[in-house]
Amino acid sequence: MGKIKKVGVLTSGGDAPGMNAAIRGVTRTALYYGLEVIGIRHGYHGMIHNHFVNLKAHSVSDILARGGTIIKTARSKEFMEAEGRKQAYENLKAAEIDAVVVIGGDGSLTGARVFCDEYFDIPFIGIPGTIDNDIYGTEYTIGYDTALNTVVEAVDKIRDTAGSHNRLFFIEVMGRDAGFIALNSGIATGAEAILIPEVVGQVENLKDYLEKGFKRKKSSNIIIVAEGDEEGGAFAIADTVKEDFRDYDVRVSVLGHIQRGGTPSAYDRVSASKLGFAAIEALMDDQKSVMVGFHHSELVLVPFRKVIKLKKKVDPEQMQMVEILSV
Ligand code: F6P
């Protein structure tokens, strides 16, 4: 690998609070090592359409506390096609960008891997950025902590009104393929049940649980549903349950994109800064096709190959714990 002189940085997929801290970490560390930094706006879409901007030290001033991403993000269908990736490669070459840091989730890192398998001479380093926390090889992804706290605050508020009216609430949280937000927000708010995509057939158990809860006359019930649950979203599940439990006063609340916004927590700012710094350090050490992540709170490098192939698992013991605690 030749000496790196110019590095591109992009954010891709769903935005996540803390992405700006990572952009700042990447930019300032790269400048420290004497590299030029190019912000690739709108993720892979911008790589294909030449949305390149120069980033200086002052370009990333005052962004630590801001949610979203200052270089914008997108989900690019074009980058999924060989033709799109070829165009992206040609644009990177023409702009003399000789390494790229990708901040994003599963789909974004898959895109990086596919690109690196086709074009070997531009090293890519990944940074896990998604509120879903569903990336194999790292116990933390940028934005998860802030999103979790947003959900907990919202559920606590819903609990107040649910209790006042003796109502059963289904609250839908984000997580298309993964239940980490649902599981941990459920634990943090004392939810009566948590329905996640990783576990099948939970609705029948839920009906048993509600039967008992009704007999004990619980004043409120909060059921957290991950949007990707295989039995449908919160509205579909609430409809099924309503048929059998006509005495329950049922309401549904979908938290939606509020979960992706807001000022990042201290934890997200610190962790994202560390990941941004580590990504450039990895490039300086001639690394390529790896994601920087955390294992037992220590920074680690994980090959894209593993990140893409393996699935991060929900701990079944935690699911059992939820049942025990929610009596
Ligand atoms: O990947 C993060 C995420 O927020 C998922 O939890 C959710 O399913 C998805 O993005 C929503 O994406 P969009 O904003 O493109 O609808």
Image: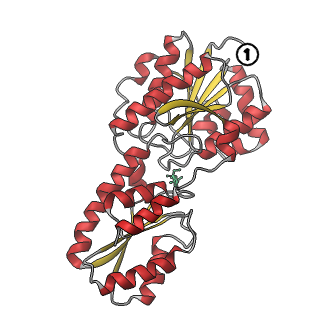
Within the image, what quadrant is residue 70 found in?
Answer: top left
Total labels drawn: 1
Task: Answer whether residue 264 is visible to the viewer in this image.
Answer: yes
- Residue drawn at point x = 45 percent, y = 59 percent: 318
Mark 1 is on which residue type?
Met
Residue 41 shown left or right of residue 246 in the figure: right
In-front residue for pair 252/280 = 280
Residue 112 shown left or right of residue 132 in the figure: right
- Location of residue 210 with respect to 323 vertically, above or below: below
- Residue drawn at point x = 48 percent, y = 37 percent: 296
Residue 298 shown left or right of residue 284 in the figure: left
- Residue drawn at point x = 39 percent, y = 88 percent: 245
In-front residue for pair 91/12 = 12
Q: In which quarter of the image is the C terminus?
A: bottom left
Q: Residues within 10 Å of mark 1 (few under 14, many from 20)?
A: few
Q: In which quarter of the image is the N terminus?
A: top right
Within the image, what quadrant is residue 24 found in?
Answer: top left
Q: Name the residue under label 1.
A: 1
Q: Where is residue 227 in the image (x, y as percent from the top left)?
A: 50, 63
- Location of residue 175 with respect to 302 vertically, above or below: below
Q: Where is residue 192 in the image (x, y as percent from the top left)?
A: 36, 70
Q: Position of residue 158 (x, y in %)?
A: 28, 66
SS state under label 1: loop
- Residue drawn at point x = 54 percent, y = 9 percent: 34
Q: Position of residue 89 (x, y in %)?
A: 73, 29
Q: Does the residue labelled 1 lie within 8 Å of ligand 1?
A: no
Task: Answer whether residue 171 is visible to the viewer in this image.
Answer: no
